[in-house]
Image (tube, coloured by chain):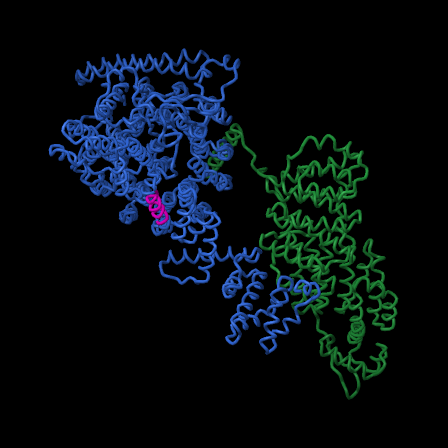
Amino acid sequence: MTQDVEMKEQAAPSNSLTSSSPSTLHHLKEIASLIETGAYAREVRRILRAVRLTMALRKKLKPSVLSAFINFALTPGSEAHTRLSSYLPKEDEHEMEVDTATSASQAPAKHSLPELEIYCYLLVLIFLIDQKKYNEAKACSSASIARLKNLNRRTVDVLAARLYYYYSLCYELTGDLAEIRGNLLALHRIATLRHDELGQETLLNLLLRNYLHYNLYDQAEKLRSKAPRFEAHSNQQFCRYLFYLGKIRTIQLEYTDAKECLLQAARKAPVAALGFRVQCNKWAIIVRLLLGEIPERTVFMQKGMEKALRPYFELTNAVRIGDLELFRSVAEKFSSTFSSDRTHNLIVRLRHNVIRTGLRNISISYSRISLVDVAKKLRLDSVADAESIVAKAIRDGAIDATLDHANGSMLSKETGDIYSTNEPQMAFNSRIAFCLNMHNEAVRALRFPPNSHKEKESAEKRRERQQQEQELAKHIAEEDDDEF
Amino acid sequence: MAAAAATMVSSAGGLLAMLNESHPQLKFHALSNLISFVDQFWPEISTSVPIIESLYEDEEFGQHQRQLAALLVSKVFYYLGELNDSLSYALGAGPLFDVSEDSDYVHTLLAKAIDEYASLRSKAAESSDEATVDPRLEAIVERMLDKCITDGKYQQAMGIAIECRRLDKLEEAITRSDNVHGTLAYCINVSHSFVYRREYRREVLRLLVKVYQQLPSPDYLSICQCLMFLDEPEAVANILEKLLRSDNKEDALLAFQVAFDLVENEHQAFLLNVKYRLSAPKSLPSEAVPPVSSETAPQNETSAAAEDVPMTDGSSVATTNVQEADPKEVMYAERLAKTKGILSGETSIQLTLQFLYSHNKSDLLILKTIKQSVEMRNSVCHSATIYANAIMHAGTTVDTFLRDNLDWLSRATNWAKFSATAGLGVIHRGHLQQGRSLMAPYLPQGGAGGGGSPYSEGGALYALGLIHANHGEGIKQFLRDSLRSTNVEVIQHGACLGLGLAALGTADEEIYDDIKSVLYTDSAVAGEAAGISMGLLMVGTASEKASEMLAYAHETQHEKIIRGLALGIALTVYGREEEADTLIEQMTRDQDPILRYGGMYALALAYSGTANNKAIRQLLHFAVSDVSDDVRRTAVLALGFVLYSEPEQTPRIVSLLSESYNPHVRYGAALAVGISCAGTGLSEAISLLEPLTSDVVDFVRQGALIAMAMVMVQINEASDSRVGTFRRQLEKIILDKHEDTMSKMGAILASGILDAGGRNVTIRLLSKSKHDKVTAVVGLAVFSQFWYWYPLIYFVSLSFSPTAFIGLNYDLKVPRFEFLSHAKPSLFEYPKPVTVPTTTSAVKLPTAVLSTSAKATKARAKKEAEQKANAEKLAGAESSSAGASTGKGKSSSEKDGEAMQVDNPPEKKAEPEPSFEILTNPARVVPAQEKFIKFLEDSRYVPVKSAPSGFVLLRDLRPSEAEELSLTDAPATTASPAGGSAAGQQSSSSAMAVDDEPQPPQPFEYTS
């Protein structure tokens, strides 16, 4: 489950950086100025962009560059500066000097924006995680979180959300996720009080992840249902939320909801977030199987997923045929994969479904079939077993049939023509609603440059236009006269 | 132990199950553990809230346990975001809810508690029934307040106390603070900007006055300002009297200062009341009593009929008694006379007049350019030029331009003649003594039917009103007589407007009846003026006359009358805020768009300068939803009035409206910005107006140009380069042959407003003490009606206030006194005069001199021919022309000395500009300059109140030395008797002012 975490970061577009571009430090400085203008103009959009740009630079971060940037952005000697510098390894000292000599001397004590300070924390934290220095990362993130608690600025929110994320990530990597649960809850509360919706979203997801990590599905669901709701701000966070929700729903046996959530998550996730989508697909496949559906072959043949989805493909095959034997063998063959995917307990549930799917196939194919045949087809040991299974399936509404005990056979009822019902209409309606919604969201996401529509008309042009209008009016009037 | 448990336990399920046990001990254990886990497991606990709630309500449970349950529920609700429930359970938790705890939970709930308490209190106060407030809630809030006060956070305490309507706590906070004066000032400020209900604000101010009076050294200036808002003339009169009777000269100076500050707010009715309540000197001999008593007779204004110069009356009485009375009483009488002079507004008007005349810097060349470029046949632009001239010279008494261009002027016919004549009133504004004689040639000749055109007669009456605006004691009777003796509707129109102006806000019943009878003749022209005039008369009284007017507005068929009445009704509710709501509701719901339009004005004026959110919301609603363009335009425009106390807000609020597809809305947006940002030169306002000045629709351009001029008045090019651009734009529009008449007219008016009052006035709607200036606001409101009726443009002159610092000594004379403006002189200097291809000075100065002499000779010839003027007048004219020309010469030489940089650009390049400037009393101090004004420490005079502009009393530190007076031109100083009594000085100074004036303009004849 860890790979899905990494997805967006690696996915960040790297094409914005060309090989011939100036030094990373230069880029960082540009980002810093972006943050600055964003902070002054209260434009969260700019800061979001800064964060996106940073991710592109992630691979190029070096201790020298970082310390140079910290020298540039923070006042040397300030608390944040000393703390952050202490996390950075002091290797190639001399090289660093070359790089920083000019910039550090130029701008001391110029910026003291909290946004920049938090941004520095973020950079260092990312660097530490990439360098696998998890203990330093933990210390750094805790310090940054402590600092964040005292800041109440909306422009920090974007950066804060990222920090929360890495904070949780580095604890997860060291396996101490339970430690920070209380802290995350407190942060979530603070974010709610400050109406920091992005923070709320992120923290809620982190909390859900935290609970799910320890299989605390019940608590996760309680928190989810009690936490304040609002419209999603970040697509990524919304995808995650859907994914976690899908998992919870699956465990709670609400497969229809779960399927919807998981499919939507997979669909909404950015193309580059492969790991996340694979994970979504795995769960979605199982949920669909549990629902008695058989996913199409194309699902397994998606680009880049073939290998990861292979076990599930075979599993599906077994379910499709309704072959218990095959199913058992597949489950055994890939048991290690399944348990690492944490889908093992669901696969156990599937056995029942395999039988039921077989039964449904039989019910569709035969209008009347003896229970002995049913037992044979499903490779059940006894007829009595078959009878009880059929009876239960009927009661659950999985098949529409009756049992003829006297003759020991199952009678399927005629299925009506679905096109004579409202069903297609409803399906159609939901698709239209989906499309309209998508369109509306796209329109809402559009941005216009300020005042571009105001094209000024010069005095001459105006006069020309007015003259034309008058002539036109005269012309029309004359035409009117002509008619009489 | 709890912390250790917290890390171990992964679910609260066990503890929750324990709540269902029957043994109370177990339940208690569960509760106390849950409390420590609630931060972690609130989602789980929230499902069991009903059980815990029932525990709280369980009578058998122990007190402590129940409170514990309440605290737990409260915390869970807090996490769930249900703050109301959370608060009520927290209150149930009693002592367990620890107010001093430093956690988000407690902070949030405390904030919630205060909000809740404040809203409960204000709801109770507004509905006036005693809604019971939870005593526990009250206790918490009180605890907070006490904590604030003991911690020394007085401002917070005051804020909360005001919000919660706890005047007792407010008083405590103020009296216990370490800097009572500072706190009081802060509190006054807060109560004006944040207390939205007028009634409550009055209560707060009343409390403040009480606190002020208990102080050992009360700040009388502030007290009197508060009392004025509370409308308590009695108290003000008492304070003034106390100060005047004091032996200390400084107290008297303070009293004068108080009086000047009160006058600045232009509340005529209030000032008159104060004046009448000041008791007469006690031990005066019997002979003095009758005149004094006639003056003090309260509110019996009409009995003091035709008292043209009440001041001289009173002071002459004082002089006659000098010898016989007790010296204390004499001193009091003398001071009283001065105070009354100030309160009647005459002192300040006279000084302003002198200042404007002596500092006049208007640029006749601009007018000349306009005149030449305007087509003769275009009557709109022709009269616009006349308006522009009047505005440019408002209050300066300089009518050179008119006299130079009599031929051109005579092209004005009918209503244009009306406004041309009325323009003289604007030019001579405040010329109280001479007003009537100035206008005499045009006034209707009593009954004889002098053959004058009714238009010029009506205009003359209107002009008289403008001259005496808001100080009409002397002229009221005359105007009434004129109104009654005519039935020509044009004259009635002028007389109505004049009366309304002169008796502004006095609510005089008899005048009201006179005007009403004009209204009931149902003549459109006279009725419109009558409607406005009734409003002017009743400004801010919220009298039930409004319903009478509304009824007639429904009855009549004439749109003009309805419009006049609509505005009149709006004027009556001026500043009444929520008291006016019923009337506003009634008007805005009306079917007639004109009355809805009046409703917009009512909203604007009732909430003027309050920035009340409710009013803004309502106006914005009408601005976008009404079906009538007029209503929409007015609704947007009205925003300007509501927001003038916070000009920075307006551009932001109307920015979207200024891009509306509807030109009327754009026009309204332009004027709204113009009104609320008038004289501020606010950068955002200019940026918003700039695109509108080249709008596609002509009238929008007109509005934008006028609004821009209002914003830029008294701002020069050095402080904002766009001013220069704008001036050039105006010139271009005026010279452009193809430009639409509407925008051309806008440009002409804009040039007038930009250089208003000889470049020495600004548009100011707030006095320095942040109270609204009634006359100014009313003036602008009526001015904005020029859309329908051009003569109303002149009302803009009511909103002009001189940008001057005028220091006065004990004798109310202007001594020579220097102070510092700590900024580059070029930032605030006068705009450079327009240049023509030949040298400017060569052209400009001669015209000025030539005009006077030419005029004088022409005048003499004419008078002799007509044989109407008597010899006395002739002599006066001669001497005045001489005086004027010397005055001119002096002022020009002065200008050379003062404004070296202006005249000699090469010299300026050579040496860097100084970073400060020494100003000499009386000096021009523009609003932007005020923050740079510093008083020199080693100066002979010290200001009583360190105000950077306006009238300031100066304390003389070296009274023994001879005083050097300024603002008196050469002939006047020789004429004034040295060291005469105050009264003598008073009258002589008024006489001197008359001497200075150029002689009254000659009656010009209309050719048509």
In screen coordinates, is B495 left or right of A337? left
The overriding secondary structure of the stretch rendered in magenta is: helix
Chain A representation colour: green
* Residue at the farthest left position: B286
Quadrant in which residue B509 is drawn: top left
Q: Verify whether residue B204 appears in magenta.
A: yes
In screen coordinates, is B512 left or right of B155? left
Q: Is residue B880 above or below residue A31?
A: above
Q: Is residue B735 above or below residue B477?
A: above
Chain in blue, by letter, is B
In magenta, the rendered stretch is B203-215
Task: Specify the quadrant that holds the C terminus of chain B.
Answer: top left
User: Residue B873, image x and y in percent?
Assistant: 20, 18
* Residue at the farthest bottom position: A406
Quadrant in which residue B289 is drawn: top left
Task: Specify the quadrant that holds the N terminus of chain B.
Answer: bottom right
User: Residue A463, image x and y in percent?
Assistant: 50, 29
Quadrant in which residue A327 is drawn: bottom right
Q: Verify whether residue A331 appears in magenta.
A: no
